[in-house]
Amino acid sequence: MGLRATRSSVSVGRVKIIYRADNIIDANLVKAALEQADVVSFISGEYLTGAVGPLLAWDLVTVMVAEADVERAAPVVESIDKMLRENRDSGDSREPASTTVLA
């Protein structure tokens, strides 16, 4: 049986990673955008980033949605990812080096 996620007492079934971020700020931006689109999402690894000290940590922070919501969530995530990439490309040094959309 796969991982089951709940929000309050409502089960959302199996969850799937839809976004990998280098920091919790980007993950929370994606989560907020998904919530605006009425898609329940969860952040995993949010509290692990401070535990690794000066070492680079990859794939610790992820955003997950229910498998049933992947199709609705994908365009939202791609839109936020595009915005973040454009900010990075314009020389905004506040943005992370890389993010990954998994839809």
Image: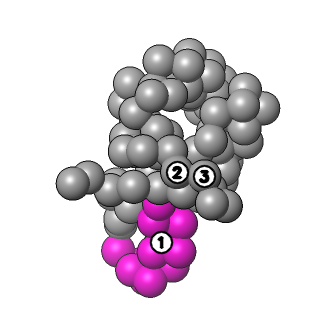
For label 1, the crowd category at 10 Å Cα-Cα, with few meaning under 14, some 14 to 19 and many 20 or more, is: some
Q: Position of residue 89 (x, y in %)?
A: 57, 25
Q: Is residue 42 visible?
A: no
Residue at point 45% right, 65% down? 45
Looking at the rendering, the stretch of residues picked out in magenta corresponds to: 44-55
User: Among all residues in the image, which is located at the extreme right?
Assistant: 36
The disc at residue 10 is 3
Q: Which residue is mark 2?
A: 11
Magenta region includes residue 82:
no
Q: Amino acid at mark 1?
A: Thr
Q: Amino acid at mark 2?
A: Ser
For label 2, the crowd category at 10 Å Cα-Cα, with few meaning under 14, some 14 to 19 and many 20 or more, is: few
The residues tagged by marks 2 and 3 sit, at their Cα atoms, a distance apart of 4 Å
Q: Position of residue 70 (x, y in %)?
A: 45, 26
The residues tagged by marks 1 and 3 sit, at their Cα atoms, a distance apart of 28 Å
Instruction: Name the N-terminal-most of marks 1 and 2.
Output: 2
Q: Is residue 70 visible?
A: yes
Q: Which residue is mark 1?
A: 49
